[in-house]
Structure formats: structure tokens, C-alpha cells
Image (spheres, rainbow, N blue to C red):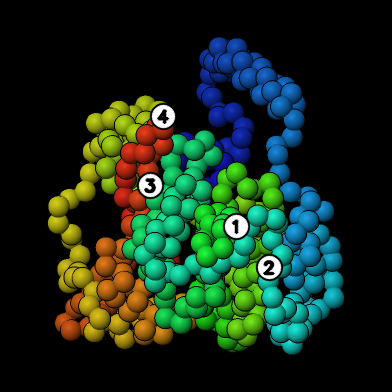
């Protein structure tokens, strides 16, 4: 129950003091408790004074008018009347037919034959993931300039194998692996300083099928972030998708952008707590000890699930059937072919990236689970020390 601690008894007197057979005893108890009550009131007043001195909590995201780029894009806005417009007549604003914000023919007509001009000193380049040298360049760019925590202590380390697996699913297109390079002498390629990617995705929104692209790995060299290259990259990948007949995209962001269709919360389950604590990734909870934490996260050496085994390519149809039936409960979902399931879960490209398991009972696949490994490196006084290989669920499984 909200607002009631798990270890607190229920208040059966609706907040009234419990009845007593001895009024004098009750009065003494009340007198004895009075200093504690006053102290609690003083504490509440102190908290209020601190809150006033610190000002109101900072709202997530920015004001609508500050989204200078997204205000020009075909996305729902935070402000009226957009959030009052609905497709089912339940909102306060104008009822709209369900579908794309911009019709396909308008998107197609807006796709220019050439990319936008970049700032002086930079050129467009399609990153060739079949070329080992260019793949290494992409790895280096992401490792040094992609996702890290707020104080720069931990940084994601996407392996080259991970990048090949994520960026080359069935139907992938080279023109959706877009880079920006520093201009170099003729005949040579300059340093890769920015990147954005897209991979095909088939979505189902209620009963409508939507061919879309999933945007990922938007990265800009940290020294160039004042040049506002991100909107230019987004516009270029949009142009390339429009030219391929794809007019819808989905993406995730750690910041609030106009306007989320859904949110996702990640949970950590520590596997080697002492190591995570030693490196500063995990903290010691109040009233706990290192030995208690190690015991709490202890893992047995054997699984208790009967019939659990590694997934094989021949399991793909049964796994896809399980996934389809699970996703049917959602209004927005991604659809997968057998080839996509195999690539993501048990292909040669997934080796050492994804681990997939099924539960087989009497010759029937009843359950499956998968996870991928994403290394996290510890940045400590200029040293790059491998911290942990983090098992995370393979979306959307």
C-alpha cells in the first residue's frame, strides 16, 4: 500500500490514539511522546526551509520552445493542441484519423537527391562495415564518444562483433550507416568524427503494419558538439530512408524528447557484487555488510529449470511462435521473420554476443530466454580498465 511501510502495522483506528483503560497512564505516555512530536515537526519545518532555499525541482527536459530542432519535425509536441488531439475521440481537441503525421507522398516528395551541406572542413561518408579498417574506426568513435555515465567513470564498450550483429540484420542497407569525416587530402579519408545508423524494423500498430527503421548509435566527437551536427545527421538518415520508401522511424533516448510513445526501466541484477563494489559501480546499502551483499547475490552453480538447453537454429519456428503469441497482447509491437529471429538469437553473427536458451519438455519448446553481453569499462585516472561484462536482456525478449 502506498505510503505505508511493509514493516508497519495497519492503523485500525483511522489515525486516532488507541483507547486506554488508564487515562493517567495515557496522559503520561502522551507527555513523554511530546518532545518527539515537536522534534519531528521541527524536522519537517527544516526540510521545508531547505526545499525553499534550493528552489523548485528542475523539470525533466526543456521548455517546448527550446526544442528548436524537434519543433520543425513531424512529431507530437508537448504543448497544446497536439496532446489534446486523439484518434479515438476521447480527447478534448480535434479527433484525427489514426495514421502517419505526414502522408507518405509528402515525405517522398521532400526527399532531396543530395545531402545537406556540412560545415566547412567536413564531408559525408558511408561507413563500410565490410571493411575491417572502417569497422575499427567506428568502434573507436563509439568507445571514446558514445554512452558514459554523468561523471565519466564508466563507459559502454561495444565490441566489433556486437556492432556487426546489431548493424547488419537481414535487410540492412549500407546507405543507412552514415558517417561524417574531417576533410582530408584528395584520395584519402579523414578521421571519422560522427555517425548515425538505421536498421529495418517491421512494426504493427494495432492492426496496421508499418515498415520502419530503427535509429541507433548517434555519436558525435565530443569536441564537435557545439557545431550542432546531430540535427544534420538526423535529417540525412531521414532523407536516406525516404529515398528507400521508409517514412517512419523509432529511437530511444536517455533524455526527454518530443514526444515519448513509451518508456523503459532497466534493473540491475549483480552477478559479482564484490567486484562491482570494489570498482565503485555498486554501493554498500545502509545497515548491510560486504559479506551480506555477497551472500544476497550468490548464484548456484546449476540451474533449477528442467529442460533448459542452448537454443539451436531448428528451434527458430517454435521460438518465433512463442514470441508472436506473447507480443499479441500489445498495441505496438515489432514483428520478426524466422531469418531475423535466427540472426538475433542463434546465428554465427550472434556468437559471443548473444546467448539464447529454450526449455524443452516432452519434445515441445515451452519457454525461451536470451541475453547479450555489453562490456563496461572503468575510466580511472586515465586508465582504461575492463570492469564487467554486463548481461542485459535481448530486446524485446
Mark 1–mark 4 Cα distance, whole angstroms, equals 33 Å
Which label's residue is closer to the chain start, 1 or 2?
1
How far across and down, in percent of the image, does residue 32 sit?
Answer: 55, 12
- 228 horizontally vs 142: left or right: right
Image quadrant in which you'd find residue 76? bottom right
Mark 4–mark 2 Cα distance, whole angstroms, equals 38 Å
Which label's residue is closer to the chain start, 1 or 4?
1
- Disc tally is 4
104 w.r.t. 232: above or below = below
Which label's residue is closer to the chain start, 4 or 2?
2
Residue nearer the viewer, 320 or 225: 225
Of tags 1 and 2, the one toward the viewer is 1
The disc placed on residue 235 is 2
Residue nearer the viewer, 96 or 138: 138
198 w.r.t. 342: above or below = above
How far across and down, in percent of the image, does residue 388 sit?
Answer: 32, 45
Of tags 1 and 3, the one toward the viewer is 1
- Residue that mark 3 sits on: 376
Q: Is residue 274 visible?
A: yes
Residue nearer the viewer, 77 or 221: 221
- 157 horizontally vs 54: left or right: left
- Residue that mark 4 sits on: 381
- Which element type, helix, strand or loop, lies under badge 1? loop
- Which element type, helix, strand or loop, lies under badge 2? helix
- Residue that mark 1 sits on: 183
Q: Residue furthest front?
A: 186
Q: Is residue 328 visible?
A: no
- Which element type, helix, strand or loop, lies under badge 4? loop
How far across and down, in percent of the image, does residue 56 sit?
Answer: 74, 34
Amino acid at each position: 500500500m502506498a505510503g505505508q511501510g511493509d514493516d508497519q502495522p495497519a492503523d485500525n483506528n483511522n489515525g486516532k490514539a488507541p483507547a486506554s483503560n488508564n487515562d493517567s497512564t495515557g496522559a503520561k505516555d502522551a507527555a513523554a511522546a511530546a518532545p518527539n512530536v515537536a522534534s519531528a515537526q521541527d524536522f519537517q519545518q527544516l526540510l521545508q526551509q531547505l526545499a525553499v532555499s534550493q528552489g523548485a525541482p528542475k523539470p525533466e527536459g526543456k521548455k517546448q520552445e527550446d526544442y528548436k530542432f524537434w519543433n520543425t519535425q513531424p512529431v507530437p509536441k508537448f504543448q497544446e493542441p497536439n496532446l489534446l488531439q486523439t484518434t479515438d475521440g476521447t480527447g478534448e481537441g480535434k479527433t484525427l484519423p489514426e495514421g502517419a503525421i505526414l502522408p507518405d507522398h509528402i515525405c517522398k516528395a521532400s526527399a532531396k537527391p543530395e545531402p545537406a551541406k556540412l560545415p566547412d572542413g567536413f564531408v559525408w561518408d558511408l561507413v563500410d562495415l565490410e571493411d575491417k579498417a572502417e569497422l575499427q574506426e567506428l568502434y573507436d568513435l563509439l568507445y571514446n564518444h558514445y554512452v558514459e555515465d554523468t561523471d565519466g567513470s564508466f563507459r559502454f564498450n561495444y565490441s566489433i562483433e556486437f556492432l556487426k550483429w546489431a548493424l547488419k540484420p537481414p535487410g540492412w542497407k549500407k546507405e543507412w550507416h552514415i558517417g561524417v569525416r574531417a576533410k582530408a587530402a584528395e584520395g584519402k579519408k579523414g578521421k571519422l568524427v560522427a555517425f548515425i545508423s538505421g536498421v529495418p524494423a517491421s512494426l504493427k500498430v494495432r492492426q496496421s503494419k508499418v515498415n520502419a527503421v530503427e535509429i541507433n548509435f548517434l555519436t558525435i566527437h565530443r569536441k564537435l558538439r557545439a557545431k550542432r551536427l546531430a540535427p544534420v545527421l538526423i535529417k540525412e538518415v531521414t532523407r536516406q530512408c525516404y529515398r528507400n520508401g521508409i517514412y517512419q522511424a523509432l529511437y530511444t533516448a536517455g533524455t526527454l524528447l518530443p514526444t515519448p510513445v513509451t518508456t523503459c526501466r532497466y534493473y540491475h541484477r549483480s552477478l559479482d557484487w564484490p567486484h562491482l563494489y570494489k570498482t565503485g559501480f555498486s554501493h554498500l546499502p545502509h545497515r548491510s555488510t560486504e559479506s551480506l551483499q555477497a551472500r544476497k547475490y550468490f548464484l548456484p552453480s546449476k540451474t533449477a529449470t528442467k529442460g533448459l538447453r542452448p537454443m539451436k537454429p531448428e528451434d527458430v519456428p517454435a521460438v518465433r511462435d512463442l514470441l508472436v503469441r506473447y507480443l499479441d497482447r500489445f498495441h505496438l509491437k515489432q514483428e520478426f521473420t524466422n531469418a531475423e529471429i535466427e540472426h538475433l538469437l542463434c546465428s554465427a553473427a550472434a556468437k559471443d554476443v548473444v546467448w539464447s536458451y529454450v526449455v524443452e519438455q516432452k519434445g515441445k519448446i515451452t519457454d525461451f530466454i536470451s541475453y547479450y553481453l555489453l562490456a563496461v569499462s572503468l575510466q580511472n585516472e586515465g586508465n582504461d580498465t575492463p570492469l564487467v561484462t554486463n548481461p542485459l536482456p535481448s530486446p524485446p525478449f
